[in-house]
Amino acid sequence: SLLNSDPDGWAEMLTLNVHSALYLMREAALRMIEDVNKNGRFSRPRDIVVLGSCVGKNVLARSSIYSATKFAVHSAAEALRREICNHGIRVSLIEPGIVETEFHDVARYGDNFYQESADSIGPLLKAEDIAELIGFVAALPAHVHLHEAGIRPVRQEYP
């Protein structure tokens, strides 16, 4: 949380979660705009898929710094979408709930986080579930855009 976290770690989290995403979104957009200029606006679908989090909108006090970084990524994705949509480039934000990955080990939520989560809201999402949604978004016709999609375990009430 904001009060209980080490401020020395904030810069690292901002760099990893915000700056890195901004650099990647920018590079992808510049390359896609160049491709549009060469090959035409709707010659094929062009997608930038941004991985956010459900806590980017539904802030959790216990992970307020992480939530703030995801809020920043969400707003940057929407800003980029507005900036490049006239080029026929789609920017889609995927907002997962609890996904069973190594993330929670890095976030130091504790050794029993997954088991406790699975017991209360399981089964949890898998990486494959997120990949399937991204595949669906990217497979849409070039003139169709699903700009935002939340995905959660069925039993996850909040966030």
Image (spheres, rainbow, N blue to C red):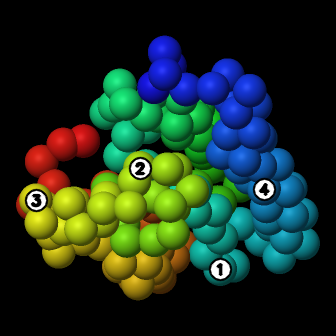
Q: Nearer the viewer, residue 94 or 123?
A: 123
Q: Residue at x 21, y 60 (%)?
A: 117
Q: Earlier in the sequence, mark 1 or mark 2?
A: 1
Q: Earlier in the sequence, mark 4 or mark 1?
A: 4
Residue 67's place in the image compared with 52, above or below, is above
Which is in the foreground here, disc 1 or disc 3?
Answer: 3
Q: CA distance from mark 1 to mark 3?
A: 43 Å
Using residue 105 as the reference point, say whether residue 24 is left or right of it.
Answer: right
* Quarter placement of the C terminus: top left
Q: Residue at x 71, y 66 (%)?
A: 41
Residue marked by disc 4: 24
Mark 4 secondary-structure assignment: helix
Residue marked by disc 2: 109
Using residue 106 as the reference point, say whether residue 111 is left or right of it.
Answer: left
Residue 62's place in the image compared with 23, above or below, is above
Residue marked by disc 3: 120
Discs 2, 3 touching: Cβ within 8 Å: no
Q: CA distance from mark 4 to mark 1?
A: 21 Å
